[in-house]
Image (spheres, rainbow, N blue to C red):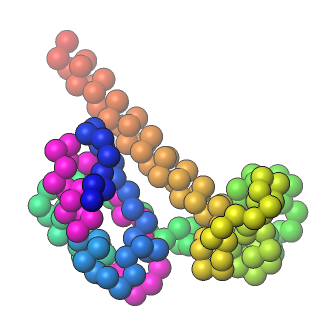
């Protein structure tokens, strides 16, 4: 079965924490197939907490050793300390909606925040997959924005380098 659509792939990302479970071969197969694509895309490891992290990192480090471009975004629970905490400051009127009720008592989507994890009723009365072990929409949006920030930073750095190279050649 074909898993990659298109011929011009720059970046491939997969959230391994929810998909590979204890089946170690899945991450290795996915990475090897991505690395064999003609455009040699950068691979993104979206990793979460747990005992499997060490194995996933080893697989990716071996791939980097043979020339595969990659970056690893570890569990975003690691940034909880810098996000607004609802239980420490219950007035979140000036907090952007995606960050409201995201951290409670130093715990990501825990404590009193569990009641707000799937606050999607203004859009849809019920959305499938809203179970306690799945992250809420705020988690996915934060992940996406962190990835976008990284990619835009790399793009800006590349453009700065390109401009400096063109001024040297002139």
Residue 159 left/right relative to 85: left
Question: Which sits in the foreground, 143 or 90?
Answer: 143
Q: Residue at x 55, y 50 (%)?
A: 145
Farthest front residue? 1
Decide whether residue 64 is among the magenta residues.
Answer: no
Above or below, 55 relative to 30: below
Q: Residue 107 is drawn in which quadrant? A: bottom right
The quadrant of the picture occupied by the C terminus is: top left
Residue range highlighted in magenta: 29-55
Q: Position of residue 108 (x, y in %)?
A: 65, 74
Residue 124 left/right relative to 48: right
Residue 90 left/right relative to 158: right
Q: Position of residue 85 (x, y in %)?
A: 74, 69
Residue 66 left/right relative to 59: left
Q: Position of residue 128 (x, y in %)?
A: 66, 67
Q: Residue 39 is drawn in which quadrant? A: top left
């Amino acid at each position: 079965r074909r898993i990659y659509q298109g011929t011009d792939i720059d970046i491939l990302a997969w959230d391994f924490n929810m998909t590979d479970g204890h089946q170690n071969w899945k991450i290795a197969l996915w990475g090897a197939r991505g690395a064999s694509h003609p455009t040699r895309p950068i691979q993104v490891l979206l990793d979460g907490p747990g005992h499997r992290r060490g194995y996933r990192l080893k697989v990716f480090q071996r791939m980097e050793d043979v020339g595969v471009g990659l970056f690893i975004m570890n569990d975003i629970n690691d940034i909880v300390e810098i996000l607004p905490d609802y239980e420490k400051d219950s007035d979140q009127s000036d907090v952007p909606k995606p960050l409201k009720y995201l951290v409670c008592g130093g715990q990501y989507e825990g404590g009193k925040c569990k009641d707000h994890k799937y606050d999607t009723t203004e859009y849809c009365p019920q959305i499938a997959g809203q179970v306690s072990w799945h992250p809420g929409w705020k988690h996915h949006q934060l992940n996406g924005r962190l990835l976008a920030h990284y990619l835009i930073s790399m793009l800006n750095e590349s453009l700065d380098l390109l401009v400096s190279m063109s001024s040297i050649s002139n």
